[in-house]
Amino acid sequence: MGKYGSKRAKSRMVVESFHRAIAKTRGMQLPRFVMLSVALLAAAGCSSSGASKATLPALSSAAPESTGIDVGAHALLYAGGPSQNAVGVYRARADNPKPLRTIRSGLNAPTGIAVDSSGSAYVCNNAGTDARRRAPGKGTWTVAVYKRGQTTPFETYSDSVWNPVDVAIAADGTVYIANYSSVVTVYPPGSLHPSARLVAPSGQAPLGIAFDAAGNIFVSYVSASGGGSVYKYAPGQTTGSNLGIGFSGSPHGLAVDRDGNLVVAVSKAPGPGSDIEIFPPGGTHPKKTINGPFQPFMIAFGRNGRELFAADFGSGNGDGGVFRFAYPSGTLIAKDTQGPAASAYGVAIDP
């Protein structure tokens, strides 16, 4: 890995020590490369009581000052990750913009992000209190929720939240949280307490969540032996079916396009060859592959499905950022590297 500034190096060392701590409790040795997916694999099949304590930078409770920029009807991009322990809010269609505002309050190693129909942003906080000190379901991992334009959370999900890595909101307001040390928990509209859990395949940990137009739920799972799977859950069902896709890498973030094609961020890091793969309904082989991102983690559609955004946390050599592709052509339009987008794990669009 190349040399970079001491401040960034220190930040990445903090994140690396966090992921090493996770793997250590599960008997897995991480490479020097900072790779969340490896830590996720180690969590598969483990109970919540085996989660570990993370050491992260101190949080600032003060909200950043407003930039004075009126976002008006412009679509907004949310992007961020644990390296900077922040989420930036950007104009979605600008070319490598600086953040309009930056969220720091209430964050603790942010990963997956989602925006609901009212414009509220949900952010997974992937670090929390040592589970051994608390009963299962009573840890301090959270999903923080921010009203549009605000930088402090107005509510948080914590009941049965353990190592959350992604979050998605259904059309009816039901919230789904992928807890990679356990399962996907389901929260009815308006409730901070889960009503159900999606049954996970044995030995695999949930990572990404997406919905199609019919309300079917798709969940990506990663395996400690490498690769993973994607399961489909019919509306209202907690038992899913394996789509039968054999991934050569780890399936991370998911999205479903207007035609029902499943879009998957596939990471082969620390080796080369990561990409974004598009599968037709019922298909087990990609009909198209989008190359470019080094380590794609989460993905999101924008501009009525005509643009695809990919959060790429990079290798530490300045190759991370949020990639914006024309869809379905896969042509790279822009790459956002300002602020928290530079090493993003999560990405979401507020249209």
Image (tube, grey):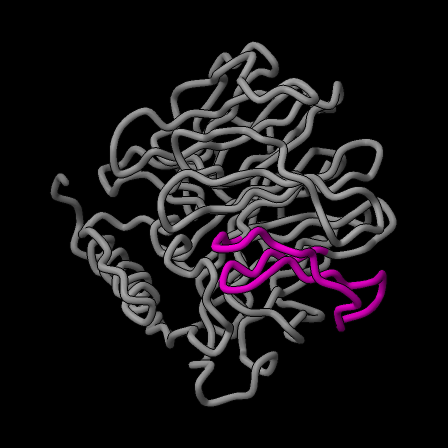
Magenta-drawn segment: 176-205
Residue 348 in picture, x, y percent from top left: 61, 42
Res 244 visible: yes
Left-right relation of 123 to 322:
right
Image quarter of the N terminus: top left
In the rendered view, would you say 287 is above or below 60? above
Residue at (24, 53) in percent of width and height = 8
Image-based side of 265 in relation to 273, left or right: right
- Report the front residue among 274 and 92: 274
- Residue 181: in magenta span: yes
Residue with the most extreme left position: 3
Q: Is residue 44 above or below residue 321?
A: below
Q: Is residue 65 visible?
A: no
Left/right placement of residue 68 relative to residue 221 reads right
Residue placed most toward the observer, 119 or 141: 141
* Labels in figure, total: 0
> Which percent across, then down, holds residue 77?
59, 39
Q: Is residue 63 left or right of residue 250?
A: right
Q: Position of residue 304 (x, y in %)?
A: 74, 24
Picture residue at 54% right of the left edge, 72% below the top: 141
Residue 251: within the magenta?
A: no
Q: Is residue 304 above or below residue 209?
A: above
Name the residue located 67 percent from the left edge and 75 percent from the top edge.
159
Q: Give the quarter of the figure containing the C terminus.
A: top right
Relative depth, front residue between 226 and 31: 226
Point out residue 306 in the picture as x, y percentages from the top left corner. 67, 18
| 22 or 57, nearer to the observer | 22
- The structure residue drawn at horizontal position 81% and vertical position 55%, both measured from the top left corner, is 174
Task: Find residue 155 and report its image quarter.
Answer: bottom right
